[in-house]
Amino acid sequence: MRLLPGPLRRKNGDNGKADGNGNDDQPKSDIPGALLVSRERDEAVINGRNGQDAKEQKALQRERLKEAATEVPATVVGWVDERTGMGPFARGFMFRKVPKGTNWFYTLGSASMFAFLSQAVTGVFLAMYYRPSADEAYTSIQHINNEVFAGELVRGMHRWGATVMVVLVFLHMGRTFFFGAYKYPRELNWIIGVVLVLLTLMMALTGYLLPFDQRSFWATVVAVNINASGPVIGPYLADFLRGGAEFGATTISRFYALHMLLVPGLIAALIGAHLYLVAKLGTTAPPWLKAEKKRELAKEEI
Amino acid sequence: MPGAFEGETVTRRGLMTGGALAAGGIASAAFGLPALGFALGPIFNNDEINDKWQDVGAESDFNERTYVAKVATLVTNVGEPGKTTVYIRKAAPEDRSPSDKPGKPIMPYVAISTRCAHLGCPVRYVQASEKFICPCHGGVYGKDGSVDGGPPVRPLDRFYTKAENGRVFVGKRFSVNSKLERFPHPRDPSNHLDGLWQYIYPGRPST
Amino acid sequence: MNGREKEQYLREYHVMKGQGKPFFPYAVAKDSFMAVFVLLVIILMAVLFGAELGPKADPTTTTYTPRPEWYFFFLFELLRVVKPPEFVFAATIGIPTLCLILLLLLPFIDRNPERHPLRRPIATLTGIAVIVAMAYLTVEGALAGAPTEIELKTAPGLEAGRSVAASSGCLGCHRIGDNGNAGPGPELTEIGDRLRAPAIRRTLLNPTAPMPSYRGLSQKNPEQFSELVQYLSSLR
């Protein structure tokens, strides 16, 4: 039985029959194509039989239809593959080897990305009800909490998802640090990762203002003033974030635009680059395994 | 140059390359600069700051011994979030600032802002000890707003005041340094103002 | 790492990779289970803790105690302990920016080809030290009480004195239990052991600068003043 459609099948052909287009192989007939009306008739002519049992014929027909149906996904993928050439790329990504000893620590990275996706999805749904203005923000959040179906759950998921994402990102960073996975040739990946940590904290900061309750407001005032403490350019940076010298009408809109558009866009782009490098360079083997390997090699060399 | 004719100074390729870069640059600037200006605009205008005199009460509401809290508007057109609390006390002769010209009268009332000069948390006046206390990081200010302890870097900001027809009016906010000299362009919290610091944290067009 | 070490690493890595398993389905299965687990945790937290919404933002407040979200507590605590005003911008911008630059440039600072944690003691110890420091600051930040409440357990008869102490600004300069600032005044959690009530009364009336005198309170409201003295002398 074929589990995987044609182009993603492994090249050593253990699934046998496929050619690039996913067609089944057919017995070659020496009757010209124009005269072939149905396969049964064709077979009947070839086999020289005329009156096959009607039930058997129907059963055969069903068989053929079923086989044709299982071919459809393979045909569709084959159609796309022929026009995009993504087969080798997808094969390379899905079936690359991960080094011996890859354990559960290595799932932290994709778990962080999953938390980000959860935030993105819950964020989109929250954005459908949120109103980013100084007088309406709070009431729109109350509306989400009280009146919207599953509003409190989605908002809770978004809020606690932020905590979970920060925790996972820091755990992933710690894992990478202690496994020495930032060394050659993965230095660029580490740098992209640190920028991603920074962007994650920025998301937390900008998103925190949006409910516009007391805690949000004052935490943001302090955060913006922290920026203002930098010499010379600090106050201008604070002006840029606030949209003026004081917390004003445009501050929430600015933070909303940063939180919804700019920073998630940057995060998505950098996650793409990060994943590309991970697939290209491979994940490291756990460092303690290398030690045993060395001893074995040494033994062999003696 | 490779591919050049006799006496040719710019090859066709060179012209095309330069033209592509120039046109690309102009196109990017055409949508980028207005957008950037849009984002950076608020840094250069101060329309939002309320600069009108506001009536905060009758002269009989205030006294020389203690501060009375009143609400004033800091930012126009934003409603509730634009307001702030101001602590007002009738001025005594000791409240003369080095910035007051000798012989001229001092401001009739001392109006102190509740914005902590460390990082902007709301300070509160404690009657029993006559101090302003910040709940965030432990800043403590004395009765005239100067720093008694903790991380704040300069005394609390003040507001211009005047008295007319028995009513007290509060104007724009200004900053003071530890000598209580006035700086008409208020600085952000955490900006020092003593000595050379005032050049590291200069006044901005947005204030 | 010089060229030889790089080559050696790549060769060893090639061998380790060859001995591994395909990403799909082995690693993908682990990743998927982890993803389900993460989702369950998020939903569980959302259901158990809910999404609270405090009172509406009010810039005119004089009673609110601002606090950041828990993952910024370490920065918050750093800002609380750095008292001298000259060092404020070092705590707000200096130290975090420095740490960020060190973190970004880590692969260029640490060029040791060794990856096993026990064979790169400097890196491992530094990492553990940073984590412990951040955890300590986070916990301290979480415990930092507001300077207008005293959270120590109090006998019912002393409740009045406790509320006078909490609202008189003592916590602006003194620590009582988990609340208040660690300076410029000494800690008062056990002041009753060191000073008897008459000594406390004398200090309140005639303190050493910069402590303000509470003579005003003793004249305006003698009952509150003696409740305050009684409470302070009970702190042992």
Image (cartoon, rainbow, N blue to C red):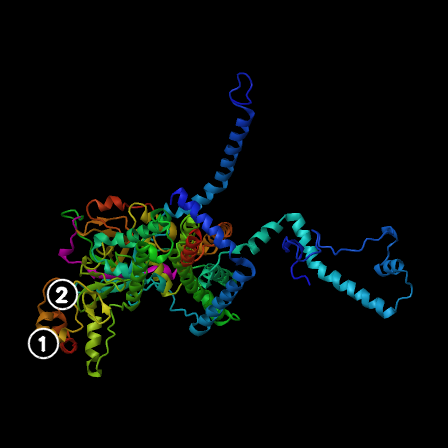
Does the image show residue B1? yes
Element marked by disc 1: loop
Q: Position of residue B46 (x, y in %)?
A: 35, 48
Left or right: C86 with respect to A258? left
- Mark 1 in CB contact with mark 2 (< 8 angstroms): no
Q: Which residue is mark 1?
A: C196
Residue type marked 1: Arg
Specify which label sits upstream in the sequence, 1 or 2.
1
Estimate how packed mark 1 is, as few (under 14), some (14 to 19) or many (20 or more) residues with alpha carbons within 10 Å. Answer: some
* Residue A260 pos. (x, y %): 47, 56
Q: Nearer the viewer, residue A215 or C188?
A: C188
Image position of A93 (left or right of C209): right
Name which quarter of the figure residue B44 lies in.
top left
Total numbered labels placed on residues in the image: 2
Image location (x, y in percent) of residue C186? 15, 66
Left/right placement of residue A240 relative to residue A68 reads left
> What span is in magenta?
B79-98
The answer to whether A243 is drawn above or below residue C55 in the figure is: above
Chain identifier of the residue bearing label 1 in the image: C
Above or below, A270 relative to C144: above
Question: The numbered mark 2 sits on a residue in which chain?
Answer: C
On whether residue A268 falls in the magenta region, the answer is no
Of residues C145 and A292, which is closer to you in this image?
A: A292
Position in image of residue A282 (x %, y %): 49, 52
| Placement of the N terminus of chain A among the 4 image quadrants | bottom right
Amino acid at dot 2: Pro
Q: Which residue is mark 2?
A: C212
